[in-house]
């Protein structure tokens, strides 16, 4: 019997390897330190447009009932306080991202944000469907691209291209990090070494796939294959044959003969085994339908099953199967190596003091418990991240001198001793000791 997860388990789940996973995905999409620098260089442009972008995003959510419902009170009225709270969080996320510091703490932050939208987050009563999170990243990608083009196109086209490329690559990583939080069934990442492949050979395959979709072939060489005696396949019947690795369905349909590749264009399902009503052949896996007489996909006639010429000779059914000549793709495994991003391996309770400027707050974890770390005029303090009033994330609040203001309901705490300075909170927050060793800080 599986042991239920505690709230601390839910908070910690997925966070320990988030930094490594961020770097792994950055390498996967080709996001380098040069791209991180380009993000940082564009931060003033992005900050200028954040209020406009955030307002357009939430206005769009409020226009449609399926997304508007998340911002309504029980009486159906708009909860403006909650709406502004979400705006505050979204603004903080993209402002922090625009600074281009993608260390372990940033990766844990994304992981924390992702899980906060799922039932495995700090509040199990909050659940935002994954498609909305994906949509938000897509919306932001387009909006940021528009802002960069508007500001840089007529001033510095090279900078425009560099910044746009960097943001597009980063959005791929962010989307993967956020989506990862929803992966209940996913396998654990192994961080296996990447492989080196012959790109020209892969291009050859892609060209062939494109030409097959148009009913073309890259060679006229064929082999003759005897399927059966004509009497073995009466009108209205079919036969599935195997030619090496190729499965083919041969149909005797309405007095004519047809042969199609037994592989659905959707997921490779055994389409030739599906039902045939009139000229419509339906794949048994996911219901994709084709015209048997020409192989066309009914929803997209430009896509079609590969078909083979059928000849009847001396009472035998013959197929002409095109032969492709290509070199095999050789794949070799490279030694695992570090990504080009200049990030540092830090434990979940560690941070770089040089990256936490005066007046800034950083989210860390100590044994799975979220902790907010503050820089007050060069002095570092730490408290529990959850406000004692309603659990609001203090790490997303405003640091005013030595007081942190909860972003949810405005409770104030002195970060030096955790005492309440203004309500509605009544209980102090727990404080932690901050240990400094050079540029490395950690909480205990």
Image (tube, helix red, strand yellow):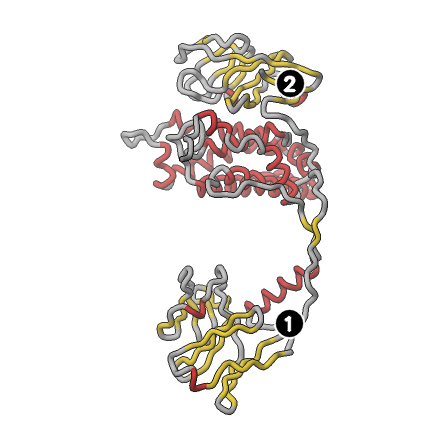
Note whether residue 99 is visible.
yes
User: Does 64 sit left or right of 45 as displayed?
Assistant: left
Q: Earlier in the sequence, mark 2 or mark 1?
A: 1
Residue neighbourhood size for the residue with mark 2, other residues' Cα within 10 Å, grouped as few (<14), some (14–19), many (≥20): some
Residue at 57 percent across and 18 percent down: it is 373
Do the numbered discs 2 and 1 sit on residues whose CB atoms are within 8 Å? no
According to the image, label 1 marks what residue? 324
User: Does 370 sit left or right of 352 as displayed?
Assistant: left
In this view, the residue farthest toward the left is: 75
SS class of the residue under badge 1? loop
Residue at 40 percent across and 80 percent down: it is 253
Q: Considering only vertical position in the picture, is 411 above or below 220?
A: above
The N terminus lies in quadrant: top left
Q: Quadrant of residue 243?
A: bottom right
The C terminus lies in quadrant: top right
Q: Position of residue 147 (x, y in %)?
A: 58, 39
Report how far apart the C-alphas of labels 2 and 1 lie in the structure: 61 Å
SS class of the residue under badge 2? strand
Q: Position of residue 367 (x, y in %)?
A: 53, 22
User: Does 443 sit left or right of 76 as displayed?
Assistant: right
Residue at 52 percent across and 70 percent down: it is 247
Q: Position of residue 338 (x, y in %)?
A: 70, 38
Residue 441: mark in rendering: 2
In this view, the residue farthest toward the bottom is: 314
- Of residues 440 and 366, the one nearer the viewer is 366
Residue neighbourhood size for the residue with mark 1, other residues' Cα within 10 Å, grouped as few (<14), some (14–19), many (≥20): few
Residue at 34 percent across and 30 percent down: it is 78
How many labels, in total? 2
- Of residues 326 and 88, the one nearer the viewer is 326
User: Does 324 sit left or right of 311 as displayed?
Assistant: right
């Amino acid at each position: 019997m599986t042991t239920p997860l505690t709230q601390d388990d839910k908070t910690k789940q997925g966070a320990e390897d988030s930094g490594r996973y961020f770097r792994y995905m950055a390498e996967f999409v080709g996001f380098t330190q040069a791209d991180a620098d380009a993000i940082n260089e564009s931060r003033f442009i992005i900050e200028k447009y954040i209020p406009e972008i955030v307002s357009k995003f939430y206005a769009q959510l409020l226009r449609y009932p399926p997304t508007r419902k998340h911002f309504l009170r029980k009486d159906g009225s708009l909860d403006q306080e909650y709406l502004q709270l979400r705006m505050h969080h979204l603004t903080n996320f993209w402002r922090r991202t625009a600074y281009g510091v993608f260390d372990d703490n940033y990766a844990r932050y994304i992981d924390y944000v992702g899980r906060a939208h799922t039932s495995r987050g700090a509040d199990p009563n909050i659940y935002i469907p994954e498609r909305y999170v994906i949509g938000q990243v897509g919306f932001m990608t387009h909006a940021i691209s528009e802002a960069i083009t508007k500001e840089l196109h007529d001033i510095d086209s090279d900078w425009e291209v560099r910044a746009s490329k960097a943001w597009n690559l980063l959005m791929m990583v962010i989307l993967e990090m956020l989506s990862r939080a929803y992966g209940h069934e996913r396998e654990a990442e192994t961080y296996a070494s990447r492989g080196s492949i012959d790109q020209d050979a892969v291009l050859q395959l892609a060209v062939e796939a494109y030409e097959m979709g148009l009913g073309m072939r890259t060679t006229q060489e064929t082999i003759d294959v005897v399927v059966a005696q004509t009497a073995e396949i009466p009108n209205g019947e079919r036969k599935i044959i195997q030619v090496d690795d190729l499965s083919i369905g041969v149909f005797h349909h309405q007095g004519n003969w047809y042969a199609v590749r037994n592989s659905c264009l959707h997921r490779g399902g055994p389409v030739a085994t599906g039902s045939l009503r009139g000229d419509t052949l339906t794949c048994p896996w996911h219901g994709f339908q084709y015209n048997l007489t020409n192989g066309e996909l009914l929803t997209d006639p430009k896509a079609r099953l590969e078909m083979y010429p059928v000849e009847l000779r001396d009472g035998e059914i013959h197929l002409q199967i095109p032969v492709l000549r290509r070199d095999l793709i050789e794949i070799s495994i490279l030694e695992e190596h570090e990504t080009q991003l200049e990030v540092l391996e830090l434990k979940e309770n560690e941070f770089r003091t040089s990256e936490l400027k005066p007046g800034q707050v950083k989210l860390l974890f100590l044994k799975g418990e979220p902790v907010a770390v503050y820089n007050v005029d060069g002095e570092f303090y730490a408290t529990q991240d959850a406000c004692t009033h309603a659990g609001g994330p203090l790490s997303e609040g405003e640091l005013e001198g030595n007081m942190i203001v909860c972003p949810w309901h405005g409770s104030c705490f002195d970060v030096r001793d955790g005492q309440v300075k203004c309500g509605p909170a009544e209980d102090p927050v727990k404080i932690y000791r901050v240990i400094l060793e050079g540029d490395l800080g950690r909480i205990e």
